[in-house]
Amino acid sequence: MLDDKGYVFLKGVVKEDIINYTNGQINNYMKTEHIFTKINSKEDVKDDKYYVNNNFQNLNTFPKIQFFRTPVFNVCGKRDTVTNNGLLEVYNPERIMTFLDGTVDMKLVTTILKKLTGVQWKFSRMNLKFMNNVVKPQRVHVDDQETCIKFCIYLSHVNDINQGPNIYIEGSHKDEKAVHDRNKIKVFNGNKGDVLVSYQNGYHGKAPNPNTITAYLTLYFVPTNPRYTNFSNYMNRPK
């Protein structure tokens, strides 16, 4: 199913009490570090522990942000004043929010991925997203062409299209023309602890969430076998 459609949606992977604890710890960290004050300063904040990227000047590309030496609080909506305004992304949050180790059972995750694909995967990076009244999210897109699986954990209940659910264009990881077929648009409402497993190589995005706050924790995995780094080689692997 994953190789065919590009996604699998799993219910109740992480218990709700664990999600609630995680959300509380995240809120405590944001308050203790005065993160929102630093975001509202409108200036880039360079700290030994993290970088608050307000202006998209020094850290002005996705690879720079994603692989910076410290975690990055990336304030979106700065490159243009409409798209993704209200989105805060935290790249590699586990390095400073060590409690996230208790949220994610990495052995369980890699076991699930092995069962879905038949190959071994290794953890690459993590991303924490807060959507706060994002009325114009980025259009569906493909991030890059390395073979990569996203394991997206819902930190919020997302019960309808107006709460910023994940969107995936079914089959677009194999055929880009699928992006033009409205019947291929899949919207994933879900509850805290649900997980969307998907190939980053397919077209994906989020719906708007006007007047709400929605949060996701996403883990990225790449194959342990270097022969499968190229996505076409991976998709043609022996089944």
Image (spheres, grey):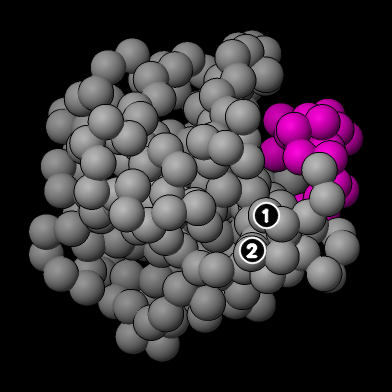
Whether residue 147 is situated above or below residue 126 in the rendered picture: below
Q: Which residue is mark 1?
A: 235
Q: Residue at x 30, y 61 (%)?
A: 76
Neighbour tally class for label 2: few under 14, some 14-19, many 20 plus, Cα within 10 Å? some
Q: Is residue 221 magenta?
A: no
Residue type, numbered disc 2: Phe
Would you say residue 113 sits in the magenta stretch?
yes
Q: Percent from the top left, x then y, of residue 127? A: 55, 52
Q: Which residue is mark 2?
A: 231
Q: Is residue 142 left or right of residue 114?
A: left
Badge 1, how many Cα within 10 Å: few under 14, some, many 20+? some
- Specify whether residue 192 is in view: yes
Distance from disc 2 to disc 1, alpha carbons, whole Å, reads: 6 Å
Task: Choose between 36 and 173: the one closer to the eye.
Answer: 173
Cβ atoms under marks 2 and 1 closer than 8 Å: yes
Picture layout, residue 228 above or below residue 26? below
**On the image, which quarter does residue 129 sit in?**
top left
In what quadrant of the picture does the N terminus appear? top right
Q: Residue furthest bottom?
A: 58
Q: Amino acid at mark 1?
A: Met
Which residue is located at x 46 percent, y 73 percent?
Answer: 62
Picture coordinates of residue 14, whole percent (x, y)? 67, 19
Q: Main secondary structure of the magenta part?
A: helix
* Magenta stretch in the rendered image: 100-123
Residue 107, given in percent of the width and then of the height, sits at: 88, 35
> Dot 2: what SS?
helix
The residue lying at 39 percent from left, 35 percent from top is: 166
Residue in the picture at 27% in, 17% down: 160
